[in-house]
Image (spheres, rainbow, N blue to C red):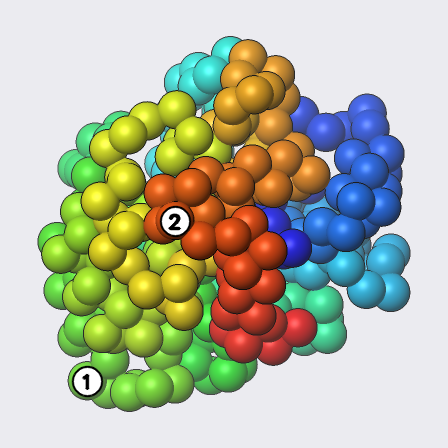
Amino acid sequence: MIDTHAHVNFKSFKDDSEEVIRRSLDSGIQMINVGSQYSTSARAVKMAEEYETGVWACVGLHPDHLKEQEWEEEGIRVKTSREKFDREKYFDLAKSKKVVAIGETGLDYHHGKENKKQQIETFQEEMRLAVDLDLPVAVHCRNAYRDILEVIAEEKKRYGEKLRGVMHSYLGRLSYATEFNDLGFFIAFNGIITYARDYDKVIRGTDIQYILTETDCPWLTPIPHRGERNEPSYVKFVAEKIAEIKGISFEKVSQETAQNARKLFGI
């Protein structure tokens, strides 16, 4: 299996990242560690380069890091510093053979959208970098699905099939998921689906050929580990829930989603 969106490169794992990665790899689960600003993107690359296989990196600037803010989510304190997207710096990071995508990028209106214009412009810049590098994009979206669709659709007119990617931690409706699929984007589900029934309809209605699995660790820990720090090895519980909801075998979900990840990320 492949955890297509992990953050073992974040501070929550500073004391035991090697142990967490080894536990995952030993259980047959590979991972893509995703950056949210330059520092965590660089850390993801460095981490991936320490492993011959099984660990990859995604580099990009998350919309929350476009302004200074602070909040707590699932007991984890998050503090961001204002960063402007520097194409050349991220281009240099992405030269590593272990970088398989640009992101996470996208739009987030949960903490306000007073900088909506900047968010959209940065998202467009990161998509264009991905196209130039022939890489997919890992897209974050929170309270902004209609805008995300419009921005991607506009860029698709320019780049066509060269623009591709995944809607990470999908929380939207089925109709939106279908539109993303039509635009060449996969849908990634994580531990949320194990304790919230809101997404059963989306999972049932989305063809397995468009589905990826992820953890988004250290957050969104699936049942039966709710209340603990999440980690890549827990992605199996996401696959089990998808199998249950779609009425297919765990083996089929594991195989199909891993194949989808290899196709999208070229791994």
Labels 1 and 2: the sequence-earlier one: 1
Quadrant assignment, res 160: bottom left
**Number of numbered discs present?**
2
Q: Which residue is mark 1?
A: 157
Indicate which label's residue lies in the foreground, 1 or 2. 2
Question: Mark 1: which amino acid?
Answer: Lys
Quadrant assignment, res 14: top right
Coordinates of residue 254 in the picture (x, y in percent): 58, 56
Instruction: Depth check: give the residue in front, 83 or 8.
Output: 8
Residue 121 seen in the current view: no
Q: Secondary structure at mark 2?
A: loop
Instruction: Depth check: give the residue in front, 35 or 160.
Output: 160
Instruction: Depth check: give the residue in front, 226 or 12.
Output: 226
The residue depicted at 61 percent of the width and 28 percent of the height is 230
Q: Which residue is mark 2?
A: 247
Callout 1 crowding tier (Cα within 10 Å): few <14, some 14–19, many ≥20: few
Coordinates of residue 178 in the picture (x, y in percent): 20, 63
Above or below 134: residue 136:
above
